[in-house]
Image (cartoon, rainbow, N blue to C red):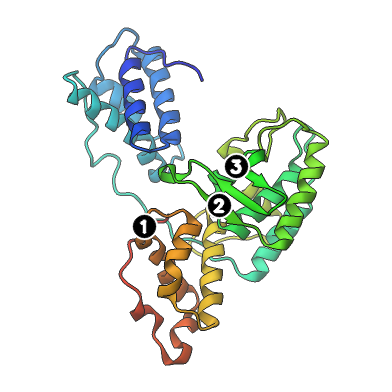
Amino acid sequence: MTAFVSNLAPHIQVLLEVKHALGLPYDQSERHLRRFDALCARDYPGQSTLTRDMAISWAAARPGEHVNGQIRRITPVRQLAKHMCSVGVTAYVIPSGIPGRQIHYTPHMFSHEQLRALFDAADQIQASPWGGQRQLIIPTIFRMIYCLGLRPGEAKKLHRNDVDLTWGTVSIRESKGHKDRIVFMAPDLHEYCRSYDAAISTYHPDRTAFFPNEWGRLSSPATLNCWFHELLNDASPAIVTSNGLPLRPYDLRHAHVIENINRWVLAGRDPEALVAYLSLHLGHSNTEDTWYYFHLAADFHPDLRGLANTDVENALPEASNALR
């Protein structure tokens, strides 16, 4: 990977080493720091301290930028400044009030009809004239996200040897918090992935990535988002939200979890007996993050509250609004 080029490079590198030593992947933050490093080298050459002008130039809102994206971009630079101050180097720390409060995202719960329309659209995707085998990858990667409840980044980063097509298991390595786990494919998904692997291997026989780009390497996060919104537009009817917020590939993970909880509770299963299992399946670091989905299930499936005259909502502990 390209080395850092500004005079802040040594401090950025040490910060990354500290974050990785703490078990944090820090991938997105590293990308932001690389762009900040390039800005510093271009606009502030020779500057060895992190000045207010440098920080504010980076923190300024960009045209069309969502406040949550701005927060994600500012946070690692703020952390860099705090790190520099901790070792006695002058650095301006962007105040915590900039850019404002994070907007909590309300997940979209797909109806069965919307899911069918989405995957029908995926199955109609045509090959790209610019290379790559999107007509094979798109139907498979979004089915894996939904059927296994994967984080989109987990699906995108799968290597070929992470997917055991003999036993039907998927190994998720170095995910959020550097946690590894194994998830199991249902027979129909297992067979679908076997067919996909045979087809994609004719184009990329020696690939490392399970979902390769045109050069056989991992695709970018932006590519996955573009594909998803293409499917939303191609679905008949087009899938939109009532609150006007854009849908995300992550919503398929939410849909997987809510649908499973709904099915379990309707079958008379005890939520408290399932939360530890579900937490492991989703790769959560603690069960408090998992309880959040039980609250969502009660919100999106009101019939759960009335099962056997039991108020499911009262059986659940309080949960945070953080989406995991």
Q: Earlier in the sequence, mark 2 or mark 1?
A: 2
- Position in image of residue 87 (x %, y %): 19, 21
Q: Work out how far the residue at label 3 is from the one at label 2, CA to CA, in angstroms.
A: 16 Å
Q: Residue at x 75, y 59 (%)?
A: 120
Q: Is residue 63 above or below residue 321?
A: above
Q: Is residue 269 above or below residue 64?
A: below
> What amino acid does circle 2 point to?
Ile
Label pair 2/1, CB-CB below 8 angstroms: no
Secondary element at tag 1: loop
Q: Is residue 234 above or below residue 85?
A: below
Label number found at residue 156: 3
Look at discs 3 and 2 and give the one toward the viewer.
2
Q: Work out how far the residue at label 2 is from the one at label 1, CA to CA, in angstroms.
A: 17 Å
Q: Earlier in the sequence, mark 3 or mark 2?
A: 3
- Position in image of residue 82 (x %, y %): 22, 29
Q: Residue at x 57, y 55 (%)?
A: 183
Label pair 3/2, CB-CB below 8 angstroms: no
> What amino acid does circle 3 point to?
Lys
- Position in image of residue 302 (x %, y %): 47, 81
Packing grade of label 2 (10 A; few <14, some 14-19, many >=20) is some
Q: Earlier in the sequence, mark 1 or mark 3?
A: 3
The C terminus lies in which quarter of the figure? bottom left
Residue behind mark 1: 286
> What amino acid does circle 1 point to?
Asn
Decide which of 226, 321 is in the foreground and name it.
321
Q: Residue at x 43, y 68 (%)?
A: 275
Label number found at residue 221: none
Q: Work out how far the residue at label 1 is from the one at label 3, CA to CA, in angstroms.
A: 24 Å
Which residue occupies the extreme top position in the image?
46
Residue behind mark 2: 182
Q: Residue at x 32, y 61 (%)?
A: 320
